[in-house]
Image (cartoon, rainbow, N blue to C red):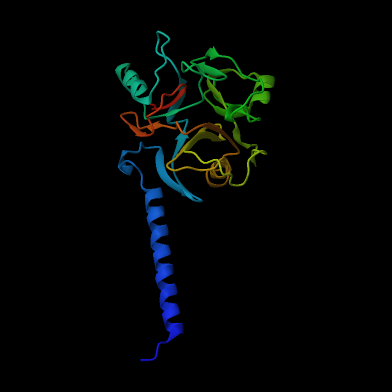
Amino acid sequence: MRVNRKAIAAIVLIVVLVAAALALWRVEATRWRAPFNLSELPAPCRAARFEYAAYIVCEIDLNKYDVGIHHSRPGGQAYGSLDAFDRAMAADGRPVQLAMNAGMYHEGLGPVGLLVENGRELSPVEAAEGEGNFYLKPNGVFLIGEDGKAALMETGKFLAARPAVKFATQSGPMLVIDGAIHPKFLPDGTSRYTRNGVGVRDPDTVVLAISLSEVSLGSFARLFRDELGCPNALFLDGAISTFSNGEKTLLGGKDPVGPIISVIERK
């Protein structure tokens, strides 16, 4: 029997390509599989895909929802987790639609940089130089003004303007600054973590996003600018990123949290 070497080579190539496609499919299936039922997502939120990662994206209309920043119980003790925060808010008659960690913290869970809750400054602006993501300048401040409008400002501009704020949290780095990606980001660097952040599309629209898989800062920034239409966006944290629907934590939750951002539906 005469062996057709070209036919055998073609068959082997097809088998290799099919095996590679199946392997890629398995990786993608794992990457896009949410660790919860999508029906558990709160009303303003949806699952989204961008580039190579999966996200939960929440687009908050400030005409329908109140956005706040929180850190401690009335006695001064940090909530420490979204579960504890959600329970405390429900017990107080103010159940939240969703919650997310909203900034970095020191040992003891004290906030790094500015934190304003209900018009009261709990921690001042941090403008010094330092190491780590927070100090990758420019960093910035996400705020809800006394007029109920949202803004996201580079820290220097915030200090120059000193707007009247009801809620504010400082973090870093900025992801998007006036439509431009942070100048120190690589297009798709090797630093990959689960990440969460906040963007402001316009004064009445706040956009929250948290990744379901590890992403680079460059890709995360493009999500806010190119997919979600936010001219300004701020990195909140990575690795410890956590998200709840007001009743249970859907993502993260193994690590403690400091500042917390909440979304409450207006009655």
Tell which residue pokes out farthest to the top in this image: 75
Q: Is residue 267 visible?
A: no
Q: Is residue 266 left or right of residue 124?
A: left
Residue 71 is drawn in which quadrant? top left
State the residue at coordinates (63%, 30%): 136
The count of marks equals: 0
Q: Position of residue 238 (x, y in %)?
A: 49, 33
Which residue is nearer to you in this view: 26 or 45? Answer: 26
Q: Is residue 72 left or right of residue 192?
A: left
Q: Position of residue 135 (x, y in %)?
A: 62, 27
Tell which residue pokes out farthest to the bottom in this image: 1
Classify 13 as above or below 95.
Answer: below
Tell which residue pokes out farthest to the front in this image: 1
State the residue at coordinates (31%, 30%): 248
Q: Is residue 79 visible?
A: yes
Classify 217 as above or below 131.
Answer: below
Q: Position of residue 100 (x, y in %)?
A: 43, 29
Q: Quadrant of the N terminus?
A: bottom left
Residue 112 is drawn in which quadrant? top right
Classify 228 as above or below 60.
Answer: below
Q: Quadrant of the C terminus?
A: top left
